[in-house]
Image: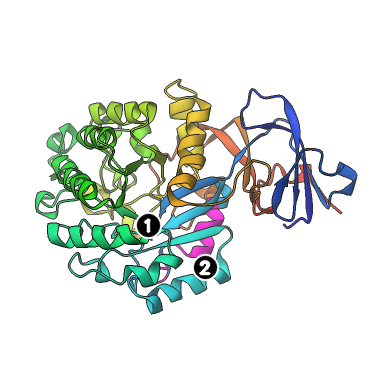
């Protein structure tokens, strides 16, 4: 639903504790609160009881297209993102073909232009075909991408990573790295901890992640490359990132809601608990929480990685790595981190909207003069996660059956209403 002039009435702006105010949007831009009267609006939203927050930004999603459309498409993924309060997402490049050249990237950009419900910003690869061996033409692709990543695969060769960082640094773009030493994986399917031992399952050691985090921070310090560490899961990685920041290295990091909500103690032998990196120990979870609190971790990203049902119903040993999460990231962080007192409401907004925009140069927000990217949320509304209610093509998530607080009522991207909860639609009136 589009609106020339949009008037949002009686909404709490930026915090549940703020006094109700009005928001005026015209030409896709947030205007002064008194820019025009309600009577002149083309569309009016009665937002009593709702909180307006900046549209969320997820810097790590998998929309699977082109190449794996049976798992998710740019259309279904972006609709699910809108339902989660997101107005911009960055899509990972483990696609077919991989976006390692302009012709391959153009296939993805054309689909985005035709089908995306919100702003979808692709990553290009770091290496050709994501094989970790041959660097690509970063200068040619840089104007069209949010950054460079080989997500799903670590880059083992130090010389290849050094060359990539040196060249990417010249573009000013972010290198977002999936840190994983292949030689240390040992065929593991979950964290090498108590659950793996008691269930006789092969484990993935923490060193497989932190060893490459250590190497990448060292190379970023040498080259000046803007390094972003994806889906941090171990206590050692948190400490290495903290140390890099103290030394002035241009390093940022993300973790995901499932690493904050769960650890290996919460698992059952079910594919909904299988992702890469895996759920770690309780001490790792606590270190991640401390990283959110002290600024070591900059972003919450969903690592939304949908799969078809037949790929996820094979137990921990045989199921595909990855879970869906973009529709649940906000209520999960609110429920497990904000409502529980681990972080403030404003810190959540920094992690999910402000910092991702700053790091990746993404527009939009709530402030006057900004592109009108806004989510309206009822943080008092409780719901139980049901796969049937998820809009993503991927329905498998560790949050199934969990009670969460924080229902997204409507999402506005560039001044257009791109999602409206059915229970809220009667509060949206157009001429």
Q: In this figure, which residue is indicated by the disc labeled 2?
A: 112
Which is more N-terminal, label 1 or label 2? 2
Point out the stretch of residues depicted in magenta. 66-81
* Rendered location of residue 367, percent (x, y): 64, 41
Disc 2 + disc 1, Cβ < 8 Å: no
* Rendered location of residue 71, percent (x, y): 41, 62
Quadrant holding the N terminus? bottom right
Quadrant holding the C terminus? bottom right
* 20 displayed left or right of 178: right
Q: Residue at x 73, y 58 (%)?
A: 2
Q: Residue at x 34, y 28 (%)?
A: 289
Check residue 361 for magenta coloring.
Answer: no
Q: Nearer the viewer, residue 220 or 390?
A: 220
Q: In this figure, which residue is indicated by the disc labeled 1?
A: 172
Badge 1 element:
loop
Q: Residues within 10 Å of mark 1 (few under 14, many from 20)?
A: some
Q: Is residue 308 visible?
A: no
Q: Nearer the viewer, residue 224 or 355?
A: 224
């Amino acid at each position: 639903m589009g609106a020339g002039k949009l008037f949002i009435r009686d909404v709490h702006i930026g915090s549940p504790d703020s006094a109700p105010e009005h928001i005026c949007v015209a030409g896709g831009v947030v205007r002064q609160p008194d820019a025009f009267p309600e009577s002149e609006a083309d569309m009016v939203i009665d937002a009593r009881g709702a909180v307006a927050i900046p549209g969320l930004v997820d810097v790590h999603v998998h929309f699977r297209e082109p190449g794996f459309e049976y798992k998710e498409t740019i259309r279904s993924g972006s609709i699910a993102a809108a339902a989660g309060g997101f107005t911009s997402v960055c899509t990972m490049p483990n696609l077919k073909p991989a976006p390692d050249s302009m012709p391959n990237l153009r296939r993805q950009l054309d689909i985005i232009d035709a089908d995306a419900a919100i702003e979808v910003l692709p990553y290009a690869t770091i290496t050709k075909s994501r094989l970790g061996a041959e660097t690509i033409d970063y200068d040619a692709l840089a104007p069209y991408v949010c950054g460079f990543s080989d997500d799903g695969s670590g880059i083992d060769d130090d010389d290849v990573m050094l060359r990539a960082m040196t060249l990417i640094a010249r573009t000013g773009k972010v290198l977002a790295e999936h840190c994983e030493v292949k030689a240390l994986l040992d065929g593991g399917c979950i964290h090498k901890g108590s659950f793996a031992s008691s269930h006789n399952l092969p484990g993935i050691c923490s060193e497989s992640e932190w060893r490459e985090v250590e190497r990448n921070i060292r190379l970023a310090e040498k080259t000046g490359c803007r390094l972003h560490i994806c889906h941090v899961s171990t206590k050692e990685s948190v400490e290495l990132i903290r140390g890099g920041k103290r030394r002035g290295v241009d390093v940022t990091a993300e973790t995901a809601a499932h690493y904050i909500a769960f650890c290996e103690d919460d698992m059952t032998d079910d594919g909904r608990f299988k992702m890469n990196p895996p759920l770690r120990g309780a001490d790792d979870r606590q270190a991640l929480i401390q990283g959110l609190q002290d600024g070591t971790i900059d972003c919450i990203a969903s690592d939304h990685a949908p799969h078809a049902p037949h790929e996820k119903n094979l137990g921990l040993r045989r199921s595909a790595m990855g879970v869906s999460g973009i529709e649940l990231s906000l209520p999960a962080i609110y429920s497990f981190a904000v409502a529980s007192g681990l972080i403030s409401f404003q810190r959540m907004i920094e992690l999910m909207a402000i910092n991702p925009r700053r790091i990746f140069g993404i527009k939009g927000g709530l402030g006057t003069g900004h592109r009108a990217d806004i989510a309206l949320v009822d943080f008092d509304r409780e719901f139980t996660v049901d796969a049937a209610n998820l809009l993503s093509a991927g329905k498998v998530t560790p949050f199934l059956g969990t009670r969460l607080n924080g229902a997204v009522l409507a999402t506005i991207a560039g001044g257009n209403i791109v999602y409206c909860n059915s229970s809220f639609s009667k509060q949206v009136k157009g001429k």
